[in-house]
Amino acid sequence: VDKHRWWKEAVVYQIYPASFLDTNNDGWGDVPGITKKLDYLKDLGVDVIWVSPIYKSPQADMGYDIADYEDIDPSYGSLADVDNLIKEIKSRNMKLVMDLVVNHTSDQHAWFLDSRSSKTSSKRDWYIWKPPIIDSTGARQPPNNWAQILGEANSAWTWDETTQEYYLSLFTPEQPDLNWENPSVRAAVHDVLRFWLDRGASGFRMDVINLISKAPSFPDAPIRVPNHKYQPGDAFYANGPRLHEYLREIRTSVLAHYDTLTVGEMPFVRDEDEIMRVVGSTSESLNMIFAFDLVDIDNVPGDFKFTLQPWDARDLKSIINRLQRLMLTRDGWNALFVENHDQPRSVSRFTDDSDAYRTLGAKLLCLMQTTLAGTLYVYQGEELGMRNVPEAWAPEEYKDIESVNFWKKYNEMYAGDKEKLGLARRILQRKARDNARTPVQWSAERHAGFTGKGATPWMRVNDDYGEVNAEVQVRVPEVEPGVLSVHAFWKRGMENRKRHKDVFVYGDFELFDAEHEKVVAYKRWSKDAAFVTLLNLSGDTVSWNVDFGRAKVAKWVAGNYNEKELEGRGTDGKIELRPWEALLGSVG
Ligand code: TEU
Ligand code: CA
């Protein structure tokens, strides 16, 4: 069987539109801003552009609360702007992937307004309504103990005064969950897909697509987090009983008639068989999923997200090994990513973002991602080595509803407790989604060139834009002879990946030295060529014995330090790796 697919080889670039580029000086990025940067993206090596939601939305959750799937929010532009964007994307031989958010809608969507209007509304059953439970004290309680995902102190159920029932709202009260058990809901969703495919989109990133089927009895979740009224309920709403049926239905009734890229966001799921049922080439409901293993590496397992869990290279290697095997030996496929709009910046999370090491760390992560199997996803600013917001920023600078809810909860629980609130601030700085949402740093001009000089960006620009910006990295691709800018390193990394796609996209994978605490090393090969990737995931100098079995490194071909010095590096026996050093060698 021919395993080659365009969507496996593609480099996908994710745009978070509010923070990408503002062209009309209202401080908010827009669709014409995306169009304006297409040449920049093409030059970088991007094939597919995934745009986070631009639909009509009250923006309770930055567009992941959609009020009209077939219209654009005026703050981003118009449908005509999108048509033009699609035309310009196609003329550059690129593709557009839309964000499909259909686990829930906005509470302002016409479907929900109708549904909540009365118990006899024809759309009542389009959402998940339940009567209250009256407890022993006579008080009204939600149907079960599930916690809200973006506000864990709250119930996942929202009380509706008018009709005296609760509706399920897993993320926030402004995002009621659709009832997929209802065939009319599914048909309406299929229409949304057709609408965008017929308009010229080439696929979808499907938001929390594994949450669309819930356990029909809506049972209480077991107590996983002590001292919390509401508990993580994912065991009962992730990968529910009818998920695979719903996905196959989307495939047969819509996707089978188009040539698309589909990637399903699937939080909470680790089980390989569950993943294979979605992406395995026999079912191939979706082409690939976003697995959360890597970006959950620093979460306390089972706990809520605002926790800090220590980890080292061994954890990273075991995750990588498992996901690589899933693709290469089990005939599945996967998305390769370390950043998106929900995650802190990768250079801050996985490496050391201090001035001394930031560019080394960013290039290390680039080398890792461009040499692993999977469809490569790059998040805006990642190609520049953008870092988390500064520690000194006040909590008021964080705009995300999840951050706001978390800060509020801590202040209610620990009012006046300096130590606890200090800890909360540190966790926010490490984990908040806001870290990825600061405006893209285009230049050293005021507001980093994101918006006009007199305008006020919707979110504060990271203070480091003087040094960290696209203009300087593109203009000066070689910082000094032999040392590439982060942007230039990414550009070359993508080129190299495509030149050797038989190795890096389709080739075999073998991990070395799984138990080493600091070094990540692996080999990738095809029948014609082989490479090894060597990463020092620490700020220490590490002596490492380069024993790749029988293979020997013939030549080091890329590195994140000075590449003019690669020749002198040992290809046999011991090699000294400097702090955060990354090397790519060809194997003879
Ligand atoms: O995210 C779903 C999700 O489960 C997580 O990524 C979640 O946002 C994270 O754990 C919270 O820290 C998707 C979107 O990517 C996210 O932006 C939306 O808020 C969410 O769905 C609801 O649509
Ligand atoms: Ca704008």
Image: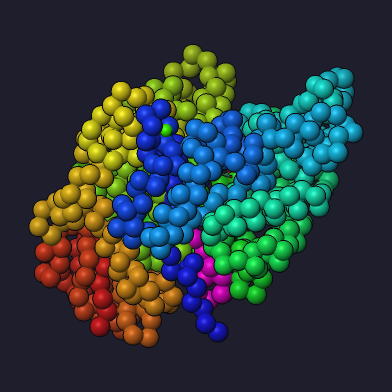
The vertical placement of 400 against 489, above or below, is above
Where does the image place residue 532, in percent across and percent down from the top left? Answer: 31, 72
For the C terminus, the image quarter is bottom left
Residue 491, given in percent of the width and then of the height, sits at 28, 59
Q: Quadrant of residue 555?
A: bottom left
Q: Is residue 444 left or right of residue 311?
A: left
Q: Which residues are magenta?
A: 327-337
Residue 191 versus residue 131: which sits nearer the camera?
191
The quadrant the N terminus occupies is bottom right
Is residue 167 in view? yes
The image shows a total of numbered marks equal to 0
Residue at x 47%, y 70% (from the top left corner): 6
Q: Residue, x 16% and y 50% (percent of image)? A: 476
Tell me where residue 376 sits by quadrant.
bottom left
Residue lying at the far right of the rendered structure: 120
Residue 330 belongs to the span the image colors magenta: yes
Residue 365 horizontal/vertical position (percent): 33, 55
**Relative to residue 339, is residue 185 drawn left or right?**
right
Q: Is residue 224 magenta?
A: no
Regarding ligand 1, which quadrant of the image does it lie in?
A: top right
Quarter location, residue 147: top right
Nearest the eye: 517 or 141: 141
User: Where 403 falls versus 326 (above or below)?
Assistant: above
Residue 73 falls left or right of residue 87: right
Question: Most prominent secondary structure in the magenta stretch?
Answer: loop
